[in-house]
Amino acid sequence: MSQRKDLIIIGNGMVGHHFVDTFRALNGADQWRIHIIGEERHSAYDRVHLSEYFQGRSHSDLALGTSEGYQQAGIAAHLGTRVERIDRAAHTVLLSDGEELCYDKLVLATGSYPFVPPIPGHDAERCFVYRTLDDLDAIRSAADQGKTGVVIGGGLLGLEAANALTSLGLTTEVIEFAPRLMPVQLDATAGTVLKDKIEALGVRVHTDTATQQIETLNDGRLRLHFADGEPLETDVLVFSAGIRPRDELARQAGLKVGERGGVCIDNHGRTSDNDIYAIGEVALWDERIFGLVAPGYRMAETVAAHLEGCDSPFLGADMSTKLKLLGVDVGAIGDAHGTTPGTLSFRYHNEAKQQYKKIVTSADGKRLLGAILVGDNSAYDSLLQYYLNDIALPAEPDSLILPSASAAPALGPDALPDSATICSCMNVTKGGIVTAIDGGCCSVAEVKAETRASSSCGGCAAMLKNLVDATLEARGVEVDHSLCEHFSYTRQALYHLVQVEQIKTFDELIRRHGRGHGCDICKPAVASILASHWNEGVHDAAHVKLQDTNDTFLANMQKDGTYSIVPRIAGGEITPDKLLVIGQVAKDYRLYTKITGGQRIDLFGAQLHQLPEIWQRLIDAGFETGHAYGKALRTVKSCVGSTWCRYGQQDSVGMAILLENRYKGLRAPHKIKFAVSGCTRECAEAQSKDIGVIATENGWNLYVCGNGGMKPRHADLFATDLDDVHLIRTIDRLLMFYVRTADRLQRTARWMESLEGGLDYLTDVILNDCLNLGEELDQQMARIVDTYQCEWKATLEDEQKLKRFRTFVNSPAGDDNILFVEERDQIRPATHEEKNRLIASA
Amino acid sequence: MTVQTQNLKWVQLCQRGDLVAESGVAARLEDQQLALFYLPDENRVYAIDNHDPFSQANVLARGLIGDLHGEWVVASPIYKQHFRLTDGQCLEASEVQLKTWPARLNNNNVEIALAL
Ligand code: SRM
Ligand SMILES: Cc1cc2nc3c(=O)[nH]c(=O)nc-3n(C[C@H](O)[C@H](O)[C@H](O)COP(=O)(O)OP(=O)(O)OC[C@H]3O[C@@H](n4cnc5c(N)ncnc54)[C@H](O)[C@@H]3O)c2cc1C
Ligand code: SF4
Ligand code: FES
């Protein structure tokens, strides 16, 4: 057996790790003894997602490799060890622990370090950089005692650091020397839009500001002095003023480095010494440093191949980026500044939505050269593909960034050449993905596992899913969207069937389009569809068996089998007399009483057989059912509005009551909540509702598709300054379209996100009526509004229905296993132990 | 469990009209609570314990019924476990099986059998 050669990799960062991974996957790797030396005490981790460390992810969550993994692979990993010097003549490296290692080939993957400008005082105790897990630990412990933070540097990483400080609870400000944020990627307008958005999130931004001195105060806090303007005090300071290649070893060893740093490499990743390579952020190729991970990975692959005697040259890399900074979408592609002579640019700037989009094209308008997006990245994937693959632009290139979705031909997977890169991190092309599918992969997860696409930054996830779905579909593979074992249809498809075939009962639907008898998934779903479409009483004989218990008994079942009672209190407005009735009923039936989060009153602890009597009394006093049990409109919250409040612009209570009465009883895929505020102070929290209405001087602003709950989502501004008529018409259409097309148990937020084209598409359908559905939706809603009946009232008038409200069919008594104890002067269900005690003492 | 008919005593619980088609009602027999499910197409009644062992509440009669893999089940209205109507077996937890009673429609009488 031939003597194994020694390969040393200096730096166990992202690129160093990727190199080892790639090299080992190539056949000849076992002819080498591999050493990897890393200065950090942690094995390589995902630096791109570094900030998630503050969201609770640990080193092992972020780890790319482990010491054990290296060991098993026969790799000697020296972690927590620095290389002090390289002796090129002797072919050795000297480690910080004194050990000396020989190499045949050496790979430099030492990355870069954060540049700290030499401002006097920059080395104070509370000054930090943002690059390693250790940096983050230090920042976290300083932030624990502090309240405020400052980031010097308003570039991409600076804003990421600002976000991290905010997430640690610090009030954060950003200082940028240049006249705008992200000067490298953005133009002046984009910088301003981004700044406004970020400031709206509570992070102050100072552009054009040069820090001159950092003074440490007696209590350890810092005071920043600027060229002009007031000084600023802070508890924590983070520098993020750019990166510099860590080329010190190369310099000491006499390798060729660039004028402004970086180890010069050729197309094979070779430095000026044929036995030494450089990859990642330390490498300078064609006078350029690539501060992103994907180009580093490409270099690693080039060098791994070259060591095996293959030629796979590195020929530069695309530096386009798509990110969410402090929750704000930002995208930059190619020559975003239009520095190429003779270019054309097209801009779209929406000040209301704080969105800015710009594209730069060739002089003839046929090719995309660059783009900038702020506030809305939805066009990014398409634009990037036009750019990377040199695809001919549509005749009106600006259609790609204008909001009207109908005009924008979405660049579908079909339009892409096989060579189109889908995942730039892992260098996976469309061709590679199609091959994986032809090789048997049947889902996004399988394609991901096979090709590793979308396993790094995740930016390509949407594109990948589209491509996989389209390819599978073209292969005739059916993606399973079945509701349950009884119906191989989605809710939307079933809705369609009901509508087109005029189906009125579950039995008919399952006979024609399903199998078996149904279950607890499909029965309530179909019941809801039938109710939305025909608006027949949910208790009509044909539907009774479909409802779950809450809908059957028009009340919410509690943990002990009792029910709660929620009368409608539209808009939260209630007369003293009605309050007295609720109080009296609660007292007579000994019900627990609570004000709900939906501005009404919930009465708990009634047994099945008591529900009709209780409701009879409420209905006699003028109450109606509150549908707290239904997938239906719940409440329309209101603030007191212009009637009383000194700031009120419109009568928010009046509007809330109008809306609640209009949509009460509407059955939907999930519950629906509204709120109406009388002015922008927003006391009714309308922006957290499915439908939010906020009064303006001229009318109403409409917000849609928000919710609280498990995954809160801020509602989006949908239309402004509507009068009452247009407000209602818009809501009618939007709700009806939701009822028709949403999935089972999908609230409006998730529904909107699931629509291709999202909010823009919804705008098009509802406001521009691009599907020509408007009148049909209006009519459908009108029919539902006109046929409203209070389900409790109808039930009380029907002997047959009332028969069901018996705790036992053969005894008038209640369930003697339901027992209460008192707490804070009201009842609550007894615990198991309390029950045993109560029974024993009885 | 095999039940021998000659050792059973049939007792009447209620009338057919008290039942709800393809749904459940609760009945009581001394200290016991039963959930009765009625399948008119098969002219059948099933009787299982009304007590839901997962929530400790007497609610199974108020669950939705349906078929899963070809067998009739009821879903608890509280935490949604499924119980087989024929033998009370819980589909989500093999160690849980509810008490069941032989049940029949005798003309319009709904009867269950008690072991003697
Ligand atoms: C009573 C009440 C809590 C209270 O004491 O304040 C309540 C109680 C229940 N909520 Fe709620 N929610 C109540 C306000 C809210 C709110 C606040 C609001 O409406 O402003 C929210 C967050 C806002 C939102 O929905 O966007 C809320 C988010 C939820 C969720 C999560 C929904 C989501 O999309 O993530 C559920 C679970 C679900 O619906 O699937 C839920 C489910 C429930 C259920 C139905 C759980 C259940 O199945 O037993 C509770 C029983 C109600 C009952 O027995 O009457 N409740 N629930 C509130 C009734 C309001 C009313 O008058 O109708
Ligand atoms: C907060 C943050 C967010 C980022 N977000 C993105 C993003 O969204 N997309 C993107 O593409 N890129 C992003 N990057 C950049 C990306 O992380 C880098 O491009 C990538 O890590 C470069 O890999 P590297 O291996 O060249 O350098 P590094 O990952 O820095 O690894 C170099 C390693 O070498 C070690 N080392 C240096 N000198 C020696 C020595 N003498 N002896 C031993 N060890 C040594 C260092 O300690 C370090 O561990 C982000 C970076 C940061 C900090
Ligand atoms: S939202 Fe405006 S009008 Fe309504 S209560 Fe608050 S301040 Fe008053
Ligand atoms: S582009 Fe980063 S994971 Fe695919």
Image: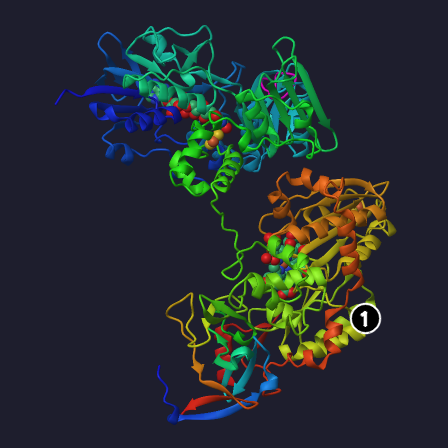
- Is A710 included in the stretch rendered in magenta? no
Determine the residue positioned at 54% across, 65% down.
A520
> Disc 1 on helix, strand or loop?
loop
> Colour scheme used in the picture?
rainbow
Nearer the observer, A37 or A230: A37
Compared with residue A433, is residue A741 higher up or lower down, i.e. above or below?
A: below
Q: Is residue B50 left or right of residue A228?
A: left
Q: Is residue A639 above or below residue A767?
A: below
Above or below: residue A531 compared with residue A399: below
Image-quadrant location for residue A64: top left
Quadrant of res A575: bottom right
Place of residue B58 in the rendered image (x, y in percent of width and height, measured from the top left): 53, 76
Question: Seen from this angle, which residue lies furthest left?
Answer: A1
Q: Residue at x 72, y 75 (%)?
A: A795
Q: Is residue A151 visible?
A: no
Three-letter amino acid code at the position of disc 1 = Gly
> Which residue appears at 36% of the width and 19% of the height?
A302
Q: Nearer the viewer, residue A404 or A564?
A: A404
Judging depth in this view, the residue of A202 and B20 nearest the camera is: B20
Q: Which region shows up in magenta?
A: A176-185
Write down the chain letter for disc 1: A
Percent across and percent down for residue A307 are 28, 18
Query: Which quarter shows the N terminus of chain A?
Result: top left
A415 sits left or right of A427 in the view: right
Q: Main secondary structure of the magenta part?
A: loop
One can see residue A707 in this view: yes
Q: How many marks?
A: 1
Q: Name the residue that disc number 1 marks.
A: A622
**Residue A798's quadrant in the figure?**
bottom right
